Image (cartoon, rainbow, N blue to C red):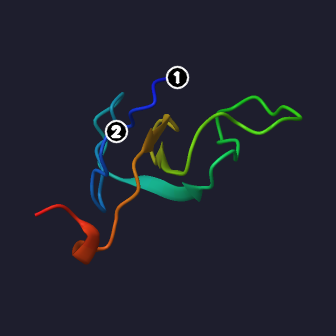
Amino acid sequence: MSDTLPPYSGDNPTCLKCSHQGAITRHRAAGEHGSGDIATFGPSPKGERLERECWRCDYVWDETLNPPEEQRPA
């Protein structure tokens, strides 16, 4: 897996597979397995992230965290 995640896509993201607007968002801690991952006894190699799941087609993708406004680059 690439170390670079796509940026946070907002409150109403568009699915990359079916173009539907709207997805569930879950916070995943570093090492936590995601919904689409095969469970293993060890931690996931993935870092802290937001996991998105399309309301229509159930496609799952990860995005970077959405930092508070005062921490965003100008």
Task: Kindly identify which residue carries mark 1.
Answer: 1
Residue 73 position within the rendered picture, expressed as x and y whole percent measured from the top left: 17, 61
Q: Residues within 10 Å of mark 2 (few under 14, many from 20)?
A: many
Query: Which of the numbered marks, if any, corresponds to residue 15?
Result: 2
Q: Amino acid at mark 2?
A: Cys
Judge whether 20 appears above or below 67 on screen.
above
- Quarter of the image for the C terminus: give it: bottom left
Label 1 to label 2: alpha-carbon separation: 20 Å
Q: Vertical placement of 37 versus 22: above or below?
A: above
**Is 35 left or right of 66, judged from the image as shown?**
right
In the rendering, at what x and y percent does residue 3 appear? Answer: 45, 30
Which residue corresponds to the image point at 65% horizontal and 33% vertical from the top-left? Answer: 45
At label 1, the amino acid type is Met
Other residues around mark 1 within 10 Å, as few (<14) / some (14–19) / many (≥20): few
Residue drawn at (34%, 38%), measured in percent from left and top?
15
Of 54 and 50, nearer the camera is 50
**Would residue 30 be found to the left or right of residue 8 on screen?**
right
Percent x, y for residue 11?
Answer: 31, 62
For residue 42, side relative to residue 37 (left or right): right
Q: Please name whichever residue, 62 or 65, is drawn nearer the observer in this view of the structure.
A: 65
**First of labels 1, 2 by sequence position:** 1
Quadrant in the rendering for residue 47: top right
Q: Secondary structure at mark 2?
A: loop
User: Which-is-in-front pick, marks 1 and 2?
Assistant: 1
> How many numbered discs, if any?
2
Residue that appears at 30% across and 50% down: 13
Image x and y of residue 46, in percent: 59, 37
Residue 7 occupies quadrant: top left
